[in-house]
Image: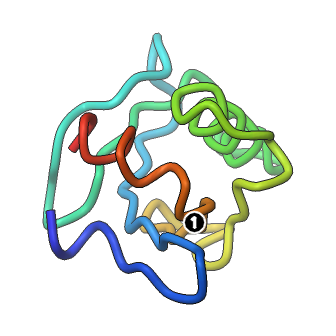
Amino acid sequence: MEKQLNIKNDLIQIEIKAVPGSSKTEIAGIRDNRLCIRIAAAPEDGKANAVLCEFLAKTLGCPKRDVVLVKGEKSRLKTVTVPSSCEEKLKGII
């Protein structure tokens, strides 16, 4: 869990391994020290990134605008930030 979460300045950085093109958007465990998330969207025109951010916001109970993709826009290895207020819900997931 240490590797997936990094708390800085009231934000939590989450290291994610995205798997686009899945049949369902869901958390698929930990892979390569990253939170693995299957995404039910194609990796084209930012669709998978949008679904990922929306899914995380809904799962963590925070506004969609608070989930920010900071690294990996065109990669399966991504880093997103969420408010530190989501820490307890994240710990329940990871």
Q: Left or right of 81: which side holds 63?
A: right
Percent coordinates x, y for residue 36 in the rendering: 30, 46
Q: Nearer the viewer, residue 33 or 42?
A: 33
Q: Is residue 23 above or below residue 76?
A: above
Residue sitting at the far bottom: 9
Q: Nearer the viewer, residue 62 or 14?
A: 62
Q: Is residue 31 above or below residue 61?
A: below
Residue 61 placement: quadrant: top right
Q: Quadrant of the C terminus?
A: top left
Kindly identify the residue that appears in the image at 27 percent across and 36 percent down: 93
Q: Residues within 10 Å of mark 1 (few under 14, many from 20)?
A: many
Q: Left or right of 79: which side holds 73?
A: right
Residue sitting at the far top: 23
Q: Which residue type carries mark 1?
A: Val
Q: Quadrant of the N terminus?
A: bottom left
Percent coordinates x, y for residue 46 in the rendering: 80, 50
Kindly identify the residue that appears in the image at 49 percent across and 21 percent down: 25
Q: Left or right of 6: which side holds 60?
A: right
Q: Callout 1: helix, strand or loop?
A: strand
Residue 22 placement: quadrant: top left
Kindly identify the residue that appears in the image at 68 percent across and 44 percent down: 53
Q: Is residue 30 above or below residue 54?
A: below
Q: Nearer the viewer, residue 11 or 15?
A: 11
Q: How many marks?
A: 1
Q: Which residue is mark 1?
A: 80
Residue 5 placement: quadrant: bottom left
